[in-house]
Image: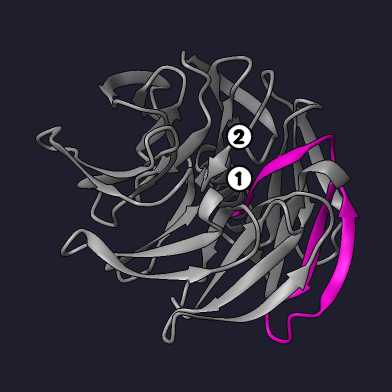
Amino acid sequence: MIRQALCSVIISFCLLFSNSILADEAFITAQNGQSLDIIDLTSMTTRVSVPIAGKPAGVALSKDGRRVFVTSPEGRFITIVDSKAGRIEKQIPINGGPLGVVVSGMGERLYVTDFYDDRLVEIDLNTQKQRSLPIGSKPAGLALTPDGKTLLVAARDDNQIIFVDLQRFSRLDQLIVGRHPYGVTIDADGRRAYVANVESNTVSVIDLLSRKMIAELPVESHPYGIALASGRIFVSNQHSESLSVFDVKDLTLVATVKVGDYPEGVCAGLDGANVYVANWFSNELWAIDAVTLKTRAKTATSDGPRAFGLFVAPGL
């Protein structure tokens, strides 16, 4: 009995220790603080803050979470960060203003919107070679379909979503959405895309098979980012200090949740149980329970968190 009890205690301790090591982490770009905060999402504490110049904004993560890719629009470069070590590996210059960023599923290529020069830039991470595609006026957010074949880019000032065939690196189609589309999110099945339209205070819902808009959801003032979790759509509203929450099946409004001051980046946790919101003006990261919609925790960030992109990865 004693041996059995002792084994149970040891196993419980090992599981607890393992979970603490493997806690998911958030990678928060702080534009005013010019840094990348790496935050343990179990303890909601900052593990390390990596200095990055050039007003960092966009963020993407490799599939294994080992590398973080950060855009600096004012610095005109991409910074690659070793997530475990919390240090910069290298910086890749880009002529223009890099803003949105995603990484291919195999981690070989980056796709970056150049907000200043109206381009989509592809970077081969093995050779550092770049090529670009004219993509429309003021491209901002972008999202990759799960099969890795198609990229959706928000051309903000054209009020369009541009579909890009990545195999040919060419424009495939375009679709008029609301005014000033910015954040773009695609569901895990690759069936629907969701676009935050900043100036029309709506979210466009796009059927990816037909490449048609199937719904337009009214939200609060100045929607910016979108996350999907627990069968719900979460939309950050900058000027309303809120999240608009919709049911993903029938697209009905579930609730409006108050958050911090000027929420921008929003991202689901890896298990879908929580949604994390970066609040630019109040310098906070909030954890919201995706089911109860209650605030689970808050933590301070460096000045001006934007976290524009998918910013949650497994701890290493």
Secondary element at image label 2: strand
Q: Is residue 258 rendered magenta in the image?
A: yes
Q: Nearer the viewer, residue 109 or 9?
A: 109
- Image coordinates for residue 189, horizontal then vertical, percent: 46, 78
Q: Is residue 315 above or below residue 281?
A: below
Above or below 295: residue 178: below
Range covered by the magenta-colored residues: 242-269
Residue type at mark 1 is Leu
Q: Amino acid at mark 2?
A: Asp
x then y, percent, for residue 198:
69, 51
Location of mark 1 (residue): 16
Q: Classify 10 Å Cα crowding around label 1: few (below 14), some (14-19), many (20 and above).
A: few
Please report the residue visible at 71 percent of the width from the left and 44 percent of the height from the top.
277
Please tell me whether residue 244 is drawn above or below residue 180 in the rendered image. below
What residue is shown with label 2? 40
The residue sitting at 62% across, 65% down in the picture is: 228
Residue 25 visible to an observer of this rendering: no
By what rule are the colours in the image chosen?
one colour
Q: Look at 64% across and 64% down and name the residue there.
A: 178
Q: Is residue 76 left or right of residue 239?
A: left
Is 13 displayed left or right of 144 in the figure?
A: right
User: In terms of sequence position, does the residue under pointer 2 or pointer 1 come before the other?
Assistant: 1
Location of the N terminus (image quadrant): bottom right
